[in-house]
Amino acid sequence: MITAATILLVAGGACFLVRALAGPSLADRVIAIDGLVVTIVAATLVNSIGTGTTWFLDVAVVAAFVGFVGTTAGARFVERRGG
Amino acid sequence: MMRAVRAAVLVIIWVGLWSDVSVANVLSGLLLAGTIVLAFDTWHAGAVVIRPVHVARFTLHFLYKLVQASLVVARTVVIPRHRVNTGIVAVPLRGCSDAVATLVADTISLTPGTLTLEVRRDPLTLFIHALDVRNVEQVQGDVRRLEVLAIKAFGPASAVAELEVDDMRSWRGR
Amino acid sequence: MDAVVAILTITGATFILLAGIGAVRFPDVYARMHAATKASTLGIALVGLATAITLDGGRAKTLLAVAFIFVTAPSAAHLVGRAAYRAEGIEIDLATRDDLAELIDDQGDG
């Protein structure tokens, strides 16, 4: 079950990565990176379910915060710099 | 009073992050929360009222719409329709407080087919990007329904009274 | 209980995968934002619920992370959407109706 969930999440992350690399505009890339960060948080939580330990939950919390701040900063940058 | 509530919420979050309710954590949390609340005193709107029954209704409606939105995304991924009618719709709201307007704008982004793009304050209007603009009235109706639920759950008593007056008026006019 | 956790985890991961596929396949910036925000938020809510059920000591942190994402993901999408509208060089597809154009013209730079 953990393997299946991890494979699904890796596939989702790969899709977001494709959009981040190929997206014709900067806004596409910012959205894709935000989705990628949510995928990372989900992968951390799935890992915690699998191993039963709680050590990596701090990583999930910090990743959520940093992802939001990064997306906000990216949005300001898009507005200034243009596509 | 509002500052005390905000500080309490911050302390709860701090203790939750440490996952350990000890004296040291609570005290350090109080110190930090007090400093933050006193230093960043930016709450302009009035007090936030919480009515549990209506909050539950609002939450259930919101969760139902979120699940519906994700299923719509799933269906559109599997069955692509490349001729979509996207557009931006302006929805004037009856504004009552900043908190309710923010909540509505956030929640709209999680309902099927809508995304908040811009908020204008002076006549409170929301500019919503909709994936299906063939029926503008429906989009505006959905947003207004959500706003009514939010006002009933979190709005100040004057706004709720206005809602009831409008309800009565529309009844009588019928 | 194991079955419930398994169903929640797999469903959550599937929704996140659908968000990723939507981000790749949808034709326009705003449509991609719709997909990425809504499906991934629901996906992480389900995975967070599964984690909160299973783990013993980490419930508060999990719920905090998920609640934070719930509150901030729509805000982030709103900011990026606003920036994409105002920036030059980003193509958006507004077939039918654009109420925002008059407002931006009125305001000048907004």
Image: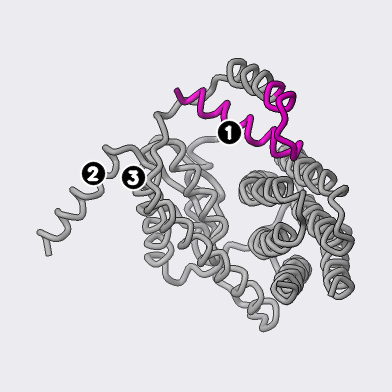
Label 3 and label 2: CA atoms lie apart by 10 Å
In this rendering, does residue A24 appear at all? no
Which sits earlier in the primary sequence, circle 3 or circle 2? 3
Marks 1 & 3 on one chain: yes
> Is disc 1 surrounded by few (<14), some (14 to 19) or many (20+) residues within 10 Å?
few
In the picture of the structure, the residue carrying the numbered disc 1 is B9
Q: Residue at x 69, y 77 (%)?
A: B77
| Residue B169 in view of the camera | yes
**Which residue carries the number 3 mark?**
B94
User: Relative to residue C62, is residue A8 depicted above or below?
Assistant: below
- Pointer 2 chain: B
Task: Answer with left or right where residue B137 lies relative to residue C80.
Answer: left
Asked if residue A35 is among those painted magenta in the image, a careful observer would answer no
Name the spot of residue B64 as percent of width and height, x first: 51, 67
The answer to whether marks 2 and 1 mark residues whose Cβ atoms lie closer than 8 Å is no
Viewer-side label of 1, 3: 1
**Left or right placement of residue A10 versus residue B76 in this view:** right
